[in-house]
Image (cartoon, rainbow, N blue to C red):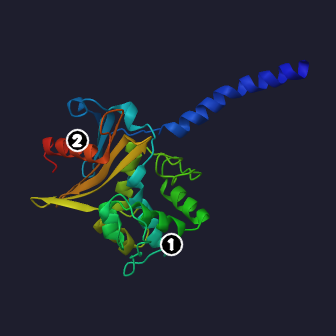
Amino acid sequence: MVIMMLAGMLVVCQLPLVSVLADDNQRYHFQAERTLYEDFSEYFIGYEGSFVLYDMKADQFQIYNKEKSIQRVSPDSTFKIFLSLFALNANAIDLNHSTIKWDGIRYPYESWNMDQNLKTAMKSSVNWYFQELDRRIPPDQRQAYLKQIGYGNAKLTGGTTPYWLESSLKISPVEQVQLLKAMYTNEWEFEETHVQAVKDAIQVGENDGKLLFGKTGTGTVNNENQNGWFIGYVEHKENTYFFATNIQEGDNSNGSTAAKITLAILKEKGIY
C-alpha cells in the first residue's frame, strides 16, 4: 500500500510538468517588442482565426487575435513551400530536372493527372508530387531540416496520412511568418538558386508593380474543410510584407476563403 501511495504521489507530481510540455507543443511562445494588435474581426465573421503581418522595413508585427496567432495547427499544403526547399537541397530534384512522371492513378482534380514539375505542382497543390519528394528525402535528413529552420513542433510521426496533412506536424501563424521571412532573406544559408526556385514557384500575382507570393492550405477531416491557410508575402520596390492567415470552425474553412480574407485586409492596408 505504501508503494502504491508513493507511486500515486509521483504521478500527481508529474502532472504539472506534463501539462507544461503539452502546452509547449500546442502553442508558440512569441516575444516581440514591436507588435501591434489590431481588430480585423469584421473579416472573420463566422470563423475562428487570426491574421499576422510583418513589415520588414519597420521591423514590426501586426496581429489579429493574439491567442490564435500562437496556436499550433496542421500546416497542410503550406508546408509544401519548405518541403520543396528541402528536396532541392537534398538533390531529390534539381533546378533543371524537377519533373516527376504521373503514376497513372486518377485523382479528383484533372490538373493532377499529368506529369508535374515544381511550378505546376505548387500551382495546383499536387499532393502525389510532394509525397514523392518527401519519400526521396531520408527520414533523418528530413528531421534535421525541420530542426535547422525551427519548423513548429517538428513532429514527423504521422499516421495514415502524410505528417503535414492534419497529422503530427503543427505550426502557428506567427511561426509561418517568421519562417517565410527567414527563407526570403536566406538566413539558413541554403543554396541561393534553390531559394529563388521556391520563390518563383509560389508567385501568384502582380498588382501595380507589387508582387504577391503565397500558398494556400486546406485541412479536411471527415470530408469537411476545417482548417484554412493562406501564407506568403508581398514584395514592393522598397519593402516586403509577410503574412499568414488561418481560419477554423466555420463553413468553407479552406485555403480559398483564407486567401479572400487575406487579400481584403491587404487591400485595406494599401499593401496589395
Q: Amino acid at mark 2?
A: Ile
Residue at 84% x, 22% y is 6
Foreground residue among 61 and 268: 268
- Classify mark 1: helix, strand or loop: loop
Q: In 3D space, how far apart are the residues under numbered discs 2 and 1 (Cα atoms)?
A: 35 Å
Front: mark 2 or 1: 2
- Classify mark 2: helix, strand or loop: helix
Q: Is residue 238 above or below residue 259?
A: below
Q: Which mark is residue 261?
A: 2
| Quadrant, the N terminus | top right
- Count residues near mark 1 (Cα–Cα under 10 Å), then give few for <14, some for 14-19, many for 20+: some
Query: Residue 175 in the image: x percent, y percent?
Result: 41, 47
Foreground residue among 149 and 86: 86
Q: Amino acid at mark 1?
A: Ala
To which residue does mark 1 refer? 90
Residue at 46% x, 69% y is 87
Q: Is residue 26 above or below residue 175?
A: above
